[in-house]
Image: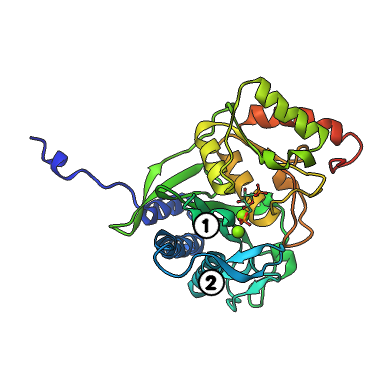
């Protein structure tokens, strides 16, 4: 008997993978590696809270509204605290942009070289009903010199300046998926060992697909071009899939092919999703996986941010489907950079 079969290897841990990748960069100093480990640690703690949220009193609303005007859930607050604390204690991050905080968060780490934009808990409407939710994060290198707090200029950088982007999906299994600009890799959490293991190396999104994801419950508010593209998807007999957690809808399409859309609507002319910690992040990942993302016309990562919580129309997924959607949206961009809604 081949004794190796007696003790099959458990796989490559996230830590080991980060270290190996760091070796690819002779001048790397290990700070970004440490930052990724800090995020992974906070994700493990938040995962534990989520897994037992039905047993302990952390279900339901927290009782106030965030800067987006949304009812904040207790788990939104818990995840926000856990990630901010991990980033502050890790020492690599000078400033944080969080969905749950109106202003930039200064960590006090003046020597910190990085800025993190984070959606601590994505899919808040699905928290208490045991449907997949997530965390979304983007990492930028500060542009101002170290030695002081991060500035607005450090925070309001276009998506093309991201040095890393990732998400955690708390679903039937918990996964961390990220890129540092050299492809996309996915790690599955093994709770009994407390480790993330490489389970999805070099993820690539199929060039096309037959899944479309959009909230048709707001179709009354769709623009004519959006309505026409949705009709096109139906005429193609594509399957409609909409979980209502951006991370989960994106993750499915990343693996199977498809398009996720949260367009500009009459009700929300800028769309709903946030540029800095939802759209840019997933745009970097999908492009690294061979897919595409835009606001229906402009590449998402080339949109100049003006505010920490800017929203933008969002079309993301398989290249051929996003390009098809852009063909339909072109009529609404004919004379401006924003869709006429
Ligand atoms: O209920 P709607 O309008 O379809 O919006 C659902 C979208 O809103 C979000 O919940 C917004 O994110 P948050 O939960 O982080 O606020 C996305 O995850 C999801 O795709
Ligand atoms: Mg979100
Ligand atoms: Mg959120």
Q: Secondary structure at mark 2?
A: helix
Residue 316 x, y percent position in the rendering: 65, 39
- State which quadrant residue 232 falls in: top right
Q: Which mark is residue 187?
A: none
Residue 320 sits above or below residue 23 on the image:
above
Q: Is residue 118 above or below residue 235?
A: below
Q: Quadrant of the C terminus?
A: top right
Q: Which residue is mark 1?
A: 127
Compared to residue 323, the image places residue 201 above or below, namely below
Image height of 230 relative to 21, above or below = above
- Asked if residue 248 can be seen in this view, the reply is yes
Secondary structure under the numbered disc 1 in the rendered image: helix
Residue 293 position, x and y percent, is 67, 39
Q: Residue furthest left?
A: 1
Question: Could you tell which of marks 2 and 1 lies nearer the N-terminus?
Answer: 2
Task: Give whichever of 68, 91 is nearer the camera.
Answer: 68
Residue 81, numbered circle: 2
* Real-space Cα separation, disc 2 to disc 1, in angstroms: 17 Å
């Amino acid at each position: 008997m081949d004794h190796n079969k007696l003790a099959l290897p458990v796989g490559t841990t996230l830590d080991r993978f980060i270290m190996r990748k760091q070796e690819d960069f002779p001048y790397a100093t290990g700070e970004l590696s440490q930052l990724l480990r800090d995020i992974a640690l906070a994700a493990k703690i938040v995962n534990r809270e989520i897994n037992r949220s039905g047993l302990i009193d952390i279900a339901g609303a927290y009782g106030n509204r965030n800067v987006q005007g949304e009812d904040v859930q207790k788990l939104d607050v818990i995840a926000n605290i856990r990630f901010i604390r991990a980033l502050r204690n890790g020492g690599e991050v000078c400033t944080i942009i969080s969905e749950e905080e109106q202003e930039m968060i200064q960590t006090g780490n003046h020597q910190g070289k990085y800025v993190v934009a984070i959606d601590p808990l994505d899919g808040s409407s699905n928290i208490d009903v045991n449907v997949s939710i997530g965390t979304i994060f983007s990492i930028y290198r500060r542009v101002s010199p170290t030695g002081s707090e991060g500035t607005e200029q450090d925070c309001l950088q276009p998506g093309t300046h991201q040095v890393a982007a990732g998400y955690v999906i708390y679903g039937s299994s918990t996964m961390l998926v990220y890129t540092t600009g050299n492809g996309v890799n996915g790690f599955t959490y093994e709770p009994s060992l407390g480790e993330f293991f490489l389970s999805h190396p070099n993820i690539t999104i199929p060039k096309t697909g037959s899944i479309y994801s959009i909230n048709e419950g707001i179709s009354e508010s769709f623009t004519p071009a959006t309505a026409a593209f949705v009709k096109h998807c139906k005429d193609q007999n594509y399957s409609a899939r909409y979980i209502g957690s951006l991370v989960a809808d994106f993750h499915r399409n990343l693996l199977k092919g498809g398009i996720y859309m949260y367009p500009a609507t009459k009700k929300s002319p800028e769309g709903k999703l946030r540029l800095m910690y939802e759209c840019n992040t997933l745009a970097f990942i999908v492009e690294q996986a061979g897919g595409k993302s835009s606001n229906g016309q402009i590449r998402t990562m080339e949109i100049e941010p003006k505010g920490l919580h800017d929203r933008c129309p969002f079309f993301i997924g398989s290249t051929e489907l996003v390009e098809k959607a852009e063909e339909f949206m072109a009529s609404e961009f004919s004379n401006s950079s924003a869709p006429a809604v």
